[in-house]
Image (cartoon, rainbow, N blue to C red):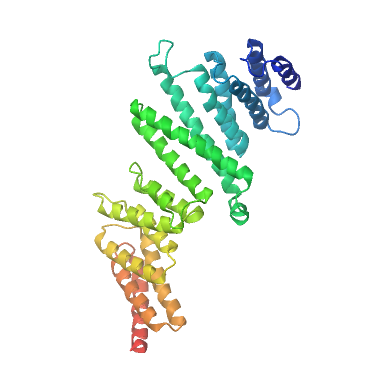
Amino acid sequence: SLVLFELHRLISKDREDGPLHDVEILVFRLAVFHLTEPRNKDAGEGDSLAVRIGKLFQLLVDRLKQTKGMQPLSETDGEYFTSVAWNTGLEAVKKGEKTPAAVCFSTCAFLIPFFFPDTTDEGHPNKSSLIHKVRKASALLLVGACILDLCKEQYPAMTRNGLPKNYQNLLHQARGALTKLLKLVDALIAEEYEEEFVSRMRVSALVLMHELLCLEGNDSPDGMRQLQLMQTPCLSVKDIVLMASISAKLGSPKASSRALDIALDTMLEASCPDEDTIAAIVRNRIELEDSEKVEEQLFKNAATNLALLSSYPADEAAWLVTTSFNRGVAHYRMGRIEKAAEAFVIAQELVCHGKKFDPTLVRLESRIREARAAVEPAQA
């Protein structure tokens, strides 16, 4: 590898702004082949295989950038380099090597236009390039995912100490990749290429873009941009719930709460509501709320929903009843008798409707009645 790198340096020494010589391309191929040979994969100490291949591809990308887009690659060379980059990236992800993985996927996306242009020599649309556009879109998606994973690993330290320059650069790279991806997805949909598959890719890109927005930390206090992104028409309720959980953890809890409210209303109005999703939204919304008054109203709403629904997860029905009852107990122990009484009333309403989904709640129903009977004289 060292000999090949030195050979490349000598060949390209006086050609920094010119096109790559055929011999230079050959040296790159020999270097990649040498590194990927089974007997050489684990040879030597220090950098892993993915890092070594990533460095080599970075050198190739830098040389191609110097040609200012005037350097085509043959289809054979292009397919070889992109295949190695793609497979190396996947292996690196499996081993948790996110940085070289991002470099390899970025290389894959960068190289495709050099050997498979969108138009033919006559200027007509190149239909055969569709599969390569999908490969490029997939590579860009993985670039964004790898970079954001790197940033999330350092997120607590980043929030305490501000955003270091290198992480600002990483976030900028992720935004660039995801922006290109969304434009490419729009083009693929316009060309009617497997719309369902490409539409799901768009959703994945929007989820990552949402995560990026949260990590950047420059949204308004109420998370307006996060909320707007979560209201994109192509998103399903489950997509919104996923993005809301990201906002709750990394971004604006207010935006998360508002998005969950919208998701719950949408699901309750659906012709075939998904009770598991409804239960997840209800629990997440309650756990996210920090206002005691709003939390009380959320439990009341949950009781109303239980009365209207024909099915509901038994464990989630039990969680609602138990949590509401425990709120009453906590109020009572703190001497807040009136609030305890209100909590027990809500708990009794919840258990009335919840026991049809979890019959074992009958045992807790008697305890709730006793607790309510105990606080009502004290309240009077």
Of 359 and 213, nearer the camera is 213
Q: x, y (%) of residue 34?
A: 68, 20
Q: Which quarter shows the N terminus?
A: top right
In the image, taking residue 132 as reference, residue 353 lies left or right, namely left
The residue closer to the viewer here, 312 or 331, is: 331
Give the camera-side residue of 287 and 321: 287
Residue 121 position within the rendered picture, expressed as x and y whole percent measured from the top left: 44, 11
Q: Does 139 sit left or right of 130 as displayed?
A: right
Indicate left or right for 358 with 69 as reference: left
Quarter of the C terminus within the rendering: bottom left
**Residue drawn at the location 58% of the way across and 51% of the way down:** 155
Q: In this view, does 13 lie above or below 229?
A: above
- The image shows residue 10 at horizontal and vertical percentages of 74, 16
Percent across and percent down for residue 376 are: 33, 85
Residue at 63% in and 43% down? 166
Residue at the spot x=42%, y=32% of the render?
A: 183
Asked where in the image residue 369 lies, by quadrant, the reply is: bottom left
Residue 143 in view, yes or no: yes
State the image quarter where residue 206 is shown: top left
